[in-house]
Amino acid sequence: MHVGIIMDGNRRFAQKEKLFPRFKGHLYGKLALERLLKHWVKMGKPKYLTLYAFSLNNLKKRSTIEKRFIFKLLEIGFKELLNSQDIFKNKVKILFVGKKEKCPKSLQNLMKDIEQKTKNHKNKFLTFCVCYDGQEEIVNSFNNMIKKGVKKADLKTIKKYLYTKDLPQVDLMIRTGDEKRISGFLLWDISYAELIFRKETWPEYTPKMFEDDLKEYEKRKRRFGK
Ligand code: FPP
């Protein structure tokens, strides 16, 4: 099973909690993610978990100071993963997808290092979308097909050239923060996904809510799966 999450609402959380500047909300977003990952490694499923950490649109539209803050947080968080028992004991393979060359060099090196050190893990798969946009991913796939001289595009070939070539289709997409949008998340792979939109902001999202969302998914599958 593959679950994708759009972690939205960090700044609105900060606003509610009267934190300033509002982008401090990302700190609480990072805490919510740590809580969830600690729980996920112990769960039987999903085997695949993919998180929208930073979009190409974020890169274009957020202020320099906020971007610097997020990239620093990602760097701190990813370093923690690299030193985490949870990842190595449970054999979690970590992948980063997106236009990674748009990230600061130090972050690029760190991501490469983590991919390298977890590349033989096969138990669970944790993917972070960084500087990612689903339309850009599809355009990139076509350009790489052209470069390789592919004469005809079909479903299998397009997938083979996506950043997510090694990941299965998404079964369940969860978005927090009360917006009912896809925002370019894993466009190719969510074609048949069930969608859950939550009112809670990302920092408020708990492992219990994740368990509930999986139950809701199972219910929908029983109703419509046949
Ligand atoms: C969306 O909230 C969230 C982001 C743009 C950044 C997500 C980053 C994290 C959760 C930190 C993750 C840390 C690691 C280690 C991966 P928003 O700013 O769009 O909030 P808003 O919708 O309230 O404005």
Image: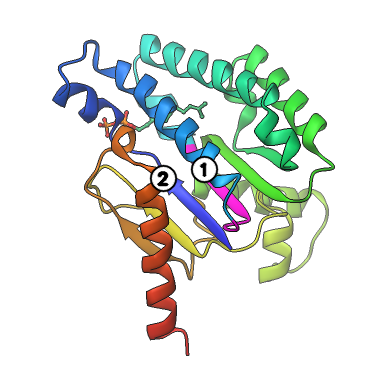
Quadrant of the rendered structure where residue 126 is?
A: top right
Residue 27, placed above or below residue 153? above
Q: Amino acid at mark 2?
A: Pro
| Image position, residue 198 (x, y; %) | 27, 51
Q: Where is residue 195, by image quadrant? A: bottom left
Q: Does residue 205 appear anywhere in the picture?
A: yes
Name the image quarter holding residue 173.
Answer: bottom left
Name the residue carrying label 2: 207
- Camera sees residue 58: no
Question: Mark 1 or mark 2, which is nearer the start of the sequence?
Answer: 1
Amino acid type indicated by mark 1: His
Disc 1 crowd, CA 10 A, few/some/many (<14, 14-19, 20+) = some
Label 2 Cα crowd, 10 Å radius (few <14 / some 14-19 / many 20+): some
Magenta-colored span: 44-52
Tell whether label 1 touches label 2 (CB within 8 Å): yes
Who is closer to the viewer here, 124 or 167? 124
Q: Position of residue 156 (x, y in %)?
A: 71, 68
Image position of 48 with respect to 15: above or below: below
Quadrant position of ligand 1 = top left
Q: Quadrant of the N terminus?
A: bottom right
**Residue on which disc 1 sits:** 39
